[in-house]
Image (spheres, helix red, strand yellow):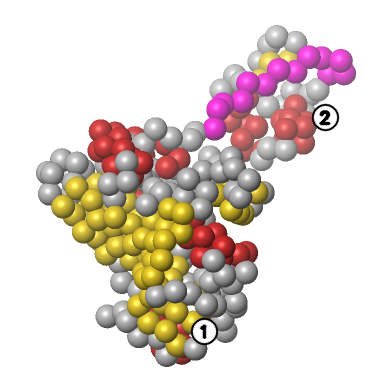
């Protein structure tokens, strides 16, 4: 059997990739570099040096990118629901970061992990709204410190069902369990603090403005579910499905912070997407301009 055919099967690689490895001298048989047409020899030692995966995000200029604000230090975008914030694996495509680094390639060098593409926080895949990234490492560090130091005002809009007070605070530690988060009633969880106020009611549904003071994964979803008012459409946390809504009703509406370079207050906002406005109209909920 030809060595390139054997390698493609043994390594589960495309023939083009095997050809590239052979041309780069990354394959050795018995200590020497074979040619593509050489045949395998029984008992011969085969050594292959595979290149490390490039962790940098793949630029995808064809993906839409709705920019809310951009300056020399940072860029804020309006993330659509259904799109992950950033890649989890080398070569992954279809995330906000893939679009971001196509327009602002310097973002890929700003964050400690290149996959994050300069993002200083994340939104769940099915959450829409304001997403912030830095264009240089100094700004990235300053913004990360602002988030961890609770110096960023993070406000969301959510529709919930079930009994809920006009306003309240949820101070409940959370811990990870497989693919979801739950209250850490016996200790050992991460501190999580959320407050909310009702903007409108209709039947058993309510439109909330939610503010988070910490940044635990799924914090809003887990906290609202814990008080018996899960987010509409959030099936993973006991939310009620809604006809025509293929996401849950959670939108990162506003982000406020002091600009790390200018020292001025910056208030960013993202409009409620059409599909969520349609849900408000169907439920008879008002309270959003």
Using residue 107 as the reference point, say whether residue 229 is left or right of it.
right
Which callout, 1 or 2, points to the residue nearer the camera?
Answer: 1
Q: Is residue 205 left or right of residue 31?
A: left
Q: Is 49 inside the magenta-drawn segment?
A: yes
Where does the image place residue 30, in percent across and percent down from the top left? Answer: 75, 10
Q: Quadrant of residue 281?
A: bottom left
| Label number found at residue 204 | 1
Q: Is residue 247 above or below residue 86?
A: below
Between 235 and 98, the one nearer to me in the picture: 235
As helix, strand or loop, the secondary structure at mark 1 comes to loop
Name the residue rendered at 56%, 26% in the picture.
Answer: 51
Above or below: residue 83 compared with residue 185: below
Circle 2 residue: 1
Q: Please state if 31 lies on the left or on the right of 277 as rendered.
A: right
The tag earlier along the polypeptide, 1 or 2, is 2
Q: Which residues are magenta?
A: 41-53
Q: Nearer the viewer, residue 127 or 60?
A: 127
| Residue found 33% across the figure and 66% down from its top | 253
In the rendered view, tell whether residue 250 sits above or below residue 186: below
Residue 181 in sight in this render: no
The quadrant of the picture occupied by the N terminus is: top right
Q: CA distance from mark 1 to mark 2?
A: 70 Å
């Amino acid at each position: 059997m030809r060595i390139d055919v054997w390698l493609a099967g043994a390594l589960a690689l495309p023939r083009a990739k095997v050809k590239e490895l052979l041309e780069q001298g990354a394959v050795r048989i018995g200590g020497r570099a074979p040619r593509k047409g050489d045949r395998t020899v029984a008992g011969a030692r085969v050594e292959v040096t595979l290149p490390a995966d490039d962790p940098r995000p793949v630029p995808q200029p064809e993906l839409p990118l709705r920019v809310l604000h951009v300056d020399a230090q940072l860029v804020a975008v309006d993330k659509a629901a259904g799109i992950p914030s950033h890649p989890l694996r080398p070569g992954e495509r279809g995330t906000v970061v893939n679009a971001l680094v196509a327009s602002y390639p310097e973002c890929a060098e700003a964050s400690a992990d290149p996959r994050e593409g300069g993002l200083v926080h994340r939104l769940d895949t099915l959450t829409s709204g304001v997403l912030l990234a830095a264009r240089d490492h100094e700004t990235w560090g300053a913004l990360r410190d602002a988030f961890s130091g609770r110096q960023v005002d993070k406000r969301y809009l959510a529709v919930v069902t079930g009994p809920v007070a006009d306003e309240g605070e949820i101070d409940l530690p959370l811990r990870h369990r497989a693919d979801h988060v739950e209250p850490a009633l016996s200790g050992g969880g991460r501190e999580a603090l959320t407050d909310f106020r009702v903007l409108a009611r209709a039947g058993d549904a309510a439109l909330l403005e939610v503010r988070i003071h910490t940044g635990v994964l799924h914090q809003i979803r887990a906290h609202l579910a814990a008080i018996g008012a899960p987010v509409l459409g959030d099936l993973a946390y006991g939310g009620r499905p809604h006809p025509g809504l293929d996401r849950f009703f959670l939108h990162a509406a506003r982000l406020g912070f002091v600009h790390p370079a200018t020292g001025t207050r910056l208030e960013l906002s993202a409009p409620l997407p059409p599909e969520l406005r349609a849900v408000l109209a169907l439920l008879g909920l008002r309270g959003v301009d």
